[in-house]
């Protein structure tokens, strides 16, 4: 698995019609960070922090939370 796979999954979540607008903005920020020029470990830590905040929200759909956990697993394995 790679950062590119994470970007693909985050873009899918961002484009999902059921994803709330506020979360779409956070997913966009995460994609922007992962596509940035910083060192991979720095990018991954920033995105993990964003995803942790999102997954702890009460009002998100369970399948979105599951997809977030999948992305977190991918990033943690890098």
Image (spheres, rainbow, N blue to C red):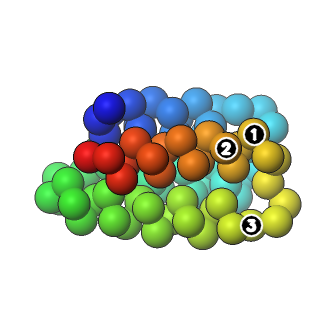
Image-based side of 68 in relation to 19, left or right? left
Q: Earlier in the sequence, mark 1 or mark 3?
A: 3
Image location of residue 35, percent across then percent down: 29, 45
Above or below for 20 versus 45: above
* Any part of residue 5 in sight: yes
Residue at 38% x, 31% y: name it. 5
**Is label 2 in a helix, a strand or a loop?**
helix
Q: How many marks?
A: 3
Which of disc 2 and disc 3 is earlier in sequence? 3
Q: Which residue is mark 2?
A: 66
Q: SS at mark 3?
A: loop
Write down the residue under mark 1.
63
Gap in Å between the C-alphas at discs 3 and 2?
A: 13 Å
Q: Identify which residue, 32 or 54, lies in the foreground.
A: 54
Image check: 52 left or right of 4? right
Q: Position of residue 3 (x, y in %)?
A: 31, 39
Q: Secondary structure at mark 1?
A: helix
- Horizontal and vertical percent position of residue 44: 32, 57
Query: Residue at horizontal 65%, vertical 60%?
Result: 55
Q: Residues within 10 Å of mark 1 (few under 14, many from 20)?
A: few
Q: Is residue 27 above or below residue 39?
A: above
The residues tagged by marks 1 and 2 sit, at their Cα atoms, a distance apart of: 5 Å
Q: Which residue is mark 3?
A: 57
| Percent coordinates x, y for residue 70 in the rendering | 53, 41
Point 64% across, 48% down: residue: 24
Answer yes or no: is residue 32 visible: no
């Amino acid at each position: 698995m790679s950062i590119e796979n994470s970007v693909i999954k985050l873009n899918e979540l961002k484009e999902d019609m059921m994803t709330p607008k506020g979360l779409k903005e956070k997913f966009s920020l995460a994609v922007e960070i992962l596509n940035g020029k910083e060192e991979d470990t720095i990018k991954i830590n920033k995105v993990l922090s964003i995803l942790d905040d999102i997954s702890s929200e009460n009002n998100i759909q369970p399948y979105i939370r599951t997809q977030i956990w999948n992305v977190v697993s991918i990033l943690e394995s890098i």
